[in-house]
Amino acid sequence: PGLGSVTEVLKGFRWVQGPGVDSWRQAPKRGGTHTYAFPYPSGGTDQVLSRSFTVSTAISSVYNKLFTCQFSPLMVEGDPGNCFPVGDLISEWESNSDGTAWTLTIHPDAKWHNFPEDGRGYDAALSGLYGRDVVAADVVHSVHYMQGKLTKPNGEPQGTASSLQFTGNTASIDVVDDKTVRFNLAEADPFFTSTLSEFNTKIMPPEIFNLDGDYTQRTVGSGPFMLTEWDRMVQWGG
């Protein structure tokens, strides 16, 4: 309920259960709290370090990806079993003629959460992060993290990345300007937009990595929810 669905036909494999598309018709409402729990310990809050669906469930609404699979309730013919990529953190994108370079423009209103002082992992040292614009350098940092290229503040290599297959074809990534980034691919990839719609290709702020060396202690994203409470043994809420 509360999805404001335009769906007339729902087809294919889906996790969605219940009375069908009629249950999606209610108009969406701004605000609210979401709580989710598993009967066993969660895999954490860093999707690059863990592919666990318990991690994805906790943080999928906290972070944005560059692309995302279109939300089925926003499709007249909903098909949750297939991915139809649309911009998530980005508002525009284009490729060169041979598909080896993609230029992406970050949404002008994209910002990192203005995180509350009583939220999980709040740190005054991150005051410059809270509420600032998402910029191209954030995307470059996140892709390098997905590729396992970063070094922790203590000089050790970052943890093993679980998302190498999604960024392995990216030969380099350039900042064009504050809101524009260019992916240079090793070879043309017709599935580039679908690849970067995958669940563990989230864009994360470098300030947290520069403080902690990963994203397990605090979660500041640009998505619709803030992760304000998290108990590895029981549940999380946002």
Image (cartoon, grey):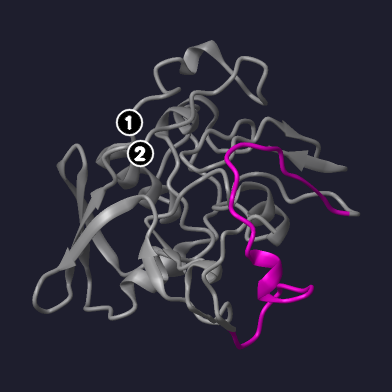
Q: Which SS class for mark 1?
A: loop
Instruction: Examine the rendered structure and indicate whether residue 215 appears above or below residue 95.
Output: above
Q: Residue furthest left?
A: 97
- Residue 133 position, x and y percent, is 32, 31
Q: Residue at x 77, y 74 (%)?
A: 17
Query: Which portion, as a residue range, is magenta?
Result: 10-38
Q: Residue furthest bottom?
A: 12
Say whether marks 2 and 1 touch (CB < 8 Å). yes
Look at the image and say whether residue 29 sits in the magenta stretch.
yes
Instruction: Examine the rendered structure and indicate whether residue 83 appears above or below residue 1.
Output: below
Q: Residue at x 81, y 37 (%)?
A: 231
Counting residues from the start of the chain, the first of labels 2 and 1 encountered is 2
Q: Residues within 10 Å of mark 2 (few under 14, many from 20)?
A: many
Residue 194 lies in quadrant? bottom left
Chief SS of the magenta region: loop
Residue 169 lies in quadrant? bottom left
Q: Nearer the viewer, residue 53 or 116?
A: 116
Q: Residue at x 50, y 36 (%)?
A: 156
Answer with left or right where residue 212 lies relative to residue 99. right
Disc on res. 165: none
- Residue 101 position, x and y percent, is 16, 66
Say what amino acid the circle numbered 1 marks.
Asp
Disc on res. 133: 1
Query: What is the distance, in whole Å, between disc 2 and disc 1 at their CAs?
Result: 6 Å
Answer with left or right where residue 226 lies relative to residue 87. right
Q: Residue at x 56, y 66 (%)?
A: 5
Q: Which residue is under mark 2?
A: 110
Q: How many marks?
A: 2
Look at the image and say whether residue 153 sits in the magenta stretch.
no
- Residue 184 position, x and y percent, is 19, 63
Say what amino acid the circle numbered 2 marks.
Ala
